[in-house]
Image: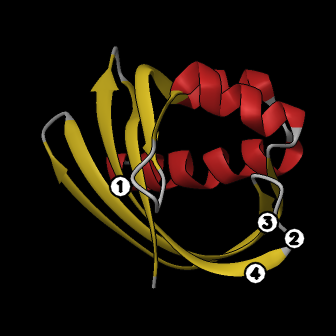
Amino acid sequence: MDDRNSVEKCYRLMYEGMVNKDEELLQKILESSFVLVHMTGMRQPKAEFICDVLDGTLNYSSARHQHIDVNIKEKEAELTGKSLVHAAVFGGGWYTWRLQLRCRLKKMNGVWLITEARASTY
């Protein structure tokens, strides 16, 4: 698999882990220093993010990917993904979000890992 496909696969796997509440998968694809920057500007480190996914604070039922753009420079990559995400977060009701994630990734020991994701709408 080439680097572009590997980077895109990380994005898809992150959503798979979020929808399925799969801690092992999220631990595997998110780098230890990972941070999610929410639309509100709140910064959530990896452990807290995974905990909130597992306990339902961040609830995801589906993600339909509309567009994924990948730019790679050696062992670093930027990915912008636009997806229709059905979610209920922080006690709110279920809603389908037009969610854009701008992700940064690093290739470490031959494996691409997500180091940051910034959420916004599109």
- Residue beneath label 2, please? 93
- Amino acid type of the residue tagged 4 in the rendering: Thr
- Residue beneath label 4, please? 96
Q: Residue at x 32, y 19 (%)?
A: 108
- Amino acid type of the residue tagged 1 in the rendering: Arg
Q: Is residue 52 above or below residue 79?
A: above
- Amino acid type of the residue tagged 3 in the rendering: Ala
Between disc 1 and disc 2, the foreground one is 2
Between disc 1 and disc 3, the foreground one is 3
Tell me, yes or no, whether the two marked residues, 2 and 3, touch with CB atoms within 8 Å. no
- Residue beneath label 3, please? 87
- Say few, some or many: other residues with alpha carbon within 10 Å of mark 4 (under 14 / 14 to 19 / 20 or more): some
Q: Residue at x 20, y 39 (%)?
A: 76
Q: Is residue 63 above or below residue 72?
A: below
Q: Quadrant of residue 56?
A: top right
Which dot marks residue 4?
A: 1
Locate residue 1, reporting x and y percent.
46, 45
Marks 1/3: CA distance? 27 Å
Marks 2/4: CA distance? 10 Å
In terms of secondary structure, where does tag 1 sit?
Answer: helix
Q: Residue at x 74, y 34 (%)?
A: 52
Marks 1/4: CA distance? 28 Å
- Amino acid type of the residue tagged 2 in the rendering: Gly
Would you say 27 lies left or right of 69 here?
right
Give the camera-side residue of 18 and 69.
18
